[in-house]
Amino acid sequence: MDVTEIFSLVLAVLFPALIGQALILFLLPSQRLPTALVVSLAYGLGLGMINQLILFFDFVHIPLAPRAIFVTIICSSGILYSRVKYRQKQGAVPKRPLQLPIVRDDIPNVLRQPFIWILTAYIAFQLFYVFFLSLNLPVYSLDGIYFIARKAKVFFYDGSLEQLKFFDWASYPMHSTISMLWVALNMGEWNEYAVKIVFPLTFCAFLVMSYYFLRIHAGVRLALTGVALTAASNLLTYHATIEYSDLSLLYYMCGALILVMFWHRTQDNGYLILASLFAGLGTFTKLEGFSYLLILIAVVLAVALYSRGWSFAVLKSFMIFSAPAMAIYLHFFFYKIIKGVPIIGRLMYDFSAANLTRAGAIFTAIINELFFSNNWNLVWFLLIVTLLQPHRRILRFENLLLAAVIVCVLMFYTVLSFFTSNYMWLAGEQKFISLSRVLMPLYPIAVWLIVLLNAGADDRKDRVF
Amino acid sequence: MNMPRINIRILVYSCIFLSALFVVLNLYLPEHVSRMVVLKLVARDFYRPNHNEFPQAGIDGTDVHTVWYTLVISASLALFIAGMITKNFVPFRICLQRFVVVGCFWLVLFSLYGQTLFLRDICLNMVSVPRGERYGLIFKGAYRYALFSKLSLPQGKRFNGKFISDFDPVQTIQPYIIAYYLYPKVSLFLDQREDDCLIVFQKINARDFVPPGYRIWDVLDDKNLIAIKEY
């Protein structure tokens, strides 16, 4: 790549971060967050918003010219920034910004610990691995060639999304596709290597986000251990190098969960709106994103009920969370209707009692996947062992919430396997194709739960780490 | 240096775990087989990248995870019993937790070894090759055909292609590799416009499948050719 191409590539990454940061600043003017956390949230948020913008441009027949997108991004970011400045001048924003309460480490001079350096070196190696592989191998994965990258290439050369309806999997959400298209539009050419930059960056942003979430709840040492465990998943790191949408779904859904937890801690509705945007953008990554959105709505209701009891505030929280997410979901939904694209995939329901005989196969598949596959190290077993700790720690609200999300998602896929044609992909003959990937967003949640349970350990000997 | 307790703990438990592993290997393997070679092979087998899942690896036909769980549980039991005998009681769940962490640590090392081998393979076979030629190494025949078509077809003109092959497009990725690579020159499996180009790929007696009204434009071999519509 020459200098111009590198510059275009940097712009392709900086613009999402710019609009994302403006949005975060606008929604959370009174929150002082660590810069790295803001950037990691801003990157995904901005990229998702640009995707929605590109979809909207195509919807209203504006040609996909980078200049039009740049102008829109710069103008909207400028408006958001100036609005924040204006509110600050008016005194609407407190002079001393609020801050998330951060757990201080009980170990003095944490950076002198060799354990910390080993963990940091391991995480650095994983980051090097994903960036090196993704930037040195062209688009080559099965789904990438079949539809994800192929759609992006066609849209790039056509200058519109007009041919979407002719693709197999036309109804499939297009976050990864449009992200690759965005990079190509910036570069002015379809570069087989550069368009993949979005995947390792998503992985990197996710690790940073995880780190701060854990850092806030458990301190530096446990946070780094959690991030290292997250990066220890073979499947997760490999997905950061290929053109699949599973990692993006994981990023948005886990991001939304983190932001809901922040909202629970601070009661600042800005976090709730951000969480909603993340959950909405998650519905644009994969079809099952909508199911995750429903689970997240249940989480928000649980948090609201826990912190405010039965009151109008619960309904208000529900509305604040549901509205932006549903707006993003409906944006693509109506786009598909207007453009004559099939609305949903090939899902066939069958509620006959005979399907209950699938129970054995379904549970065996899930147990095999969680405990005997090479995807997740021994993390699921570690979680079970950690749950053997005294009950008072497990019964903490945040831990219960994470455990409930894991149970809900597992139940969702179990029900899906029982009563739909997806049985074949989840527990039937073709389970090797989908099961590992659909359970991927649960993996970081399991790691967080392990870390949070250990963070709550009163006695050092009770700690796993 | 003031070593934190956790590091010493991991070291001690790792030693116990490793000893247990070698006991298991001794039980399983004949004497003439090197234990280190077996471990290296398992580590290599442990990291086989696949976009859907990482397949299970095995030691002498037994899945690595089963071996690991056996080791973790038996080592924990041993520590628990030793604690009882020496009156230095450690609850079983604590023993189990510590050995699971050690088990995780060893699997991380396995993955790291596999990752470095994979990186080495990529460096040797891919990075040393110019970027434009890497597709050829990955997709071989399909890419060779796509490149041939791209170079043969007249410049500055776009075609709407029809795919003819003995491959079933639903069952294999080959047709989509060609479709991906040939775009925008040839549009395959997309819009409903009338076809003006035939992409005949891996079809026995390819020439026999060119219908009247089409002219054979270029031939790669007797199974692969391109034909375009005559006006």
Image: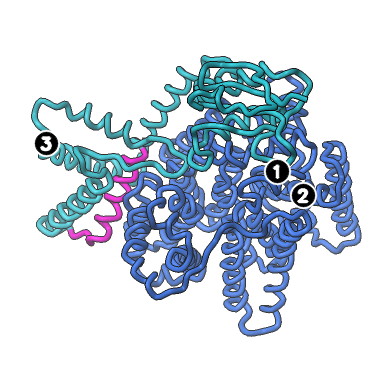
Chain colours: A blue, B cyan
Is A37 above or below relative to A267? above
Q: Which residue is mark 1?
A: A178
Q: Which residue is mark 3?
A: B26
Within the image, what quadrant is residue A152 found in?
Answer: top right
Label 2 environment density (alpha carbons within 10 Å; few <14, some 14–19, many ≥20): many
- Mark number displayed over residue A55: 2
How much space separates mark 3 and mark 1, taking CA atoms? 54 Å
**Left or right of A87 on screen, residue A388:** left
Within the image, what quadrant is residue B210 found in?
Answer: top right
Contact? badges 1 and 2 (CB < 8 Å): yes
Is A299 above or below relative to A207? below
Dominant secondary structure of the residues highlighted in magenta in the image:
helix
The answer, for residue A178, to whether it is visible in the render is yes
**Left or right of B96 on screen, residue B175:** right
Q: Please report the residue visible at 82 percent of the width from the left and 61 percent of the height from the top.
A: A93
The x, y position of residue B156, in whole percent, is: 79, 21
Judged from the image, the secondary structure of the residue bearing numbered disc 2 is: helix
Q: Please report the residue visible at 72 percent of the width from the left and 69 percent of the height from the top.
A: A320
Quadrant containing the N terminus of chain A in the rendered view:
top right
How much space separates mark 1 and mark 2, taking CA atoms? 8 Å
Q: Nearer the viewer, residue A397 or A381?
A: A381
Within the image, what quadrant is residue B162 found in?
Answer: top right
User: Which segment is the magenta one?
Assistant: B89-108
- Magenta stretch encompasses residue B101: yes
| Amino acid at circle 2 | Leu
Q: Nearer the viewer, residue A127 or A181?
A: A181
Label 3 environment density (alpha carbons within 10 Å; few <14, some 14–19, many ≥20): few
